[in-house]
Image (tube, rainbow, N blue to C red):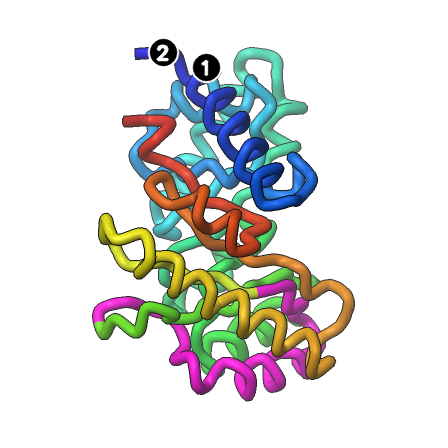
C-alpha cells in the first residue's frame, strides 16, 4: 500500500482532474480529510504533508484526537502545525454538544434544524464568535439520514441567515450508498439546484459559496455537479 502522503497526492490529482473535466479551475474543490478511522500517527502524517482541513463525525472523538494531535506536534517541536489545523464537524451534532464543538471547529457542515441553529447562535454569542455553517439537506430523501427535508430548505435558510452569530456559507448533502451513478448524480444535482435557488433569491450574502458533497466513492460525480468541498477518508486510510 502506498504511504498516506502518496494517497493524498493521488486524491488531490483526482480532484484536480475532475474539476478540469467539469470546466472548472483545478483547485476549485477543497479536500476535507475525514479522520474518523485514522490513527493519531496517520493524522499527523496528513498534517505534515500540508493537508490541514480535517473532518470529524463525533464531538467526543474530535476533542480527543484534536488534543492528542496537538500534544504530539508540540512534543516534536511542530506546535505551529497544530495551530494551522482547521477542524470541520461533518457528523450529526446534538444540541448539548454545541459548546465544545465551537471551541474546536472552524466550520460546522451538519446544521439541519432550526433548534440546532438557534443553539449554535446562542452559544456563539457567549463565546463572541461568528460561526461558519453549512445547512445539511437530505437530498436522497432517505428516512434514516439526517438533513433538512428538501421542501423546507429555503425557509430554513432564510431563518438561519437572520441569526447574527452564524454565517451561512452553503449546503451539505450525502448521496445514497449505491453503485448506480445516476441515483448519486440526481441527489447531487438536487443540492446544486437548491444552492442556486437560494443564491438567486438573495436570501443570503456573498459568503454563500460552498457545496459540501462527495466522499471517497463518489467525489468525482460531486465535483461534476458543483461541489466545492469533498469529504474523503476511506480512500486515504483504508
Q: Is residue 86 visible?
A: no
**Closer-to-camera residue (41/143):** 143
209, above or below 58, in the image: below
Left or right? Give the position of 127 relative to 218: right
Looking at the rendered image, the quarter that the N terminus falls into is top left
Residue at 60% across / 85% down in the picture? 159
Q: Which residues are magenta?
A: 144-170
99, above or below 154, in the image: above
Asked whether residue 138 is drawn in magenta, I would say no
Residue 174: x and y in percent read: 37, 58
Residue at 61% across / 77% down in the picture? 197
Q: Is residue 63 visible?
A: yes
As drawn, the label of residue 62 is none
Q: Which residue is mark 2?
A: 2
2, above or below 21, in the image: above
Q: Say which element carries label 2.
A: loop
Asked whether residue 145 is drawn in magenta, I would say yes
Looking at the rendered image, the quarter that the C terminus falls into is top left
Q: Residues within 10 Å of mark 1 (few under 14, many from 20)?
A: few
Left or right? Give the position of 53 relative to 162: left
Res. 95 image quadrant: bottom left
Residue 11: x and y in percent read: 47, 28
Residue 135: x and y in percent read: 51, 69
Residue 25: x and y in percent read: 69, 39
Circles 2 and 1: CB distance less than 8 Å? Answer: yes
In this rendering, the count of numbered labels is: 2
Q: Which residue is mark 1?
A: 6
Amino acid at each position: 500500500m502506498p504511504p498516506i502522503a502518496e494517497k493524498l497526492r493521488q486524491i488531490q490529482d483526482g480532484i484536480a482532474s475532475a474539476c478540469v473535466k467539469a470546466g472548472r479551475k483545478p483547485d476549485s474543490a477543497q479536500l476535507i480529510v475525514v479522520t474518523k478511522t485514522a490513527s493519531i500517527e496517520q493524522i499527523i502524517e496528513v498534517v505534515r504533508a500540508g493537508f490541514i482541513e480535517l473532518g470529524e463525525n463525533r464531538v467526543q472523538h474530535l476533542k480527543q484526537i484534536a488534543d492528542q494531535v496537538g500534544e504530539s506536534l508540540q512534543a516534536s517541536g511542530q506546535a505551529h502545525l497544530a495551530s494551522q489545523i482547521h477542524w470541520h464537524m461533518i457528523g450529526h451534532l446534538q444540541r448539548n454538544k454545541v459548546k465544545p464543538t465551537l471551541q474546536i471547529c472552524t466550520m460546522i457542515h451538519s446544521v439541519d434544524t432550526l433548534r440546532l441553529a438557534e443553539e449554535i447562535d446562542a452559544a456563539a454569542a457567549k463565546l463572541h464568535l461568528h460561526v461558519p455553517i453549512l445547512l445539511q439537506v437530505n437530498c436522497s430523501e432517505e428516512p434514516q439520514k439526517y438533513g433538512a427535508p428538501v421542501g423546507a430548505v429555503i425557509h430554513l435558510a432564510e431563518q438561519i441567515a437572520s441569526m447574527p452569530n452564524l454565517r451561512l456559507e452553503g449546503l451539505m448533502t450525502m448521496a445514497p450508498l449505491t453503485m448506480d451513478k445516476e441515483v448519486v448524480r440526481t441527489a447531487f444535482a438536487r443540492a446544486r439546484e437548491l444552492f442556486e435557488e437560494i443564491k438567486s433569491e438573495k436570501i443570503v450574502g456573498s459568503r454563500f459559496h460552498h457545496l459540501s458533497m462527495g466522499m471517497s466513492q463518489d467525489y468525482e460525480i460531486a465535483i461534476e455537479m458543483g461541489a466545492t468541498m469533498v469529504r474523503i477518508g476511506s480512500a486515504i486510510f483504508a
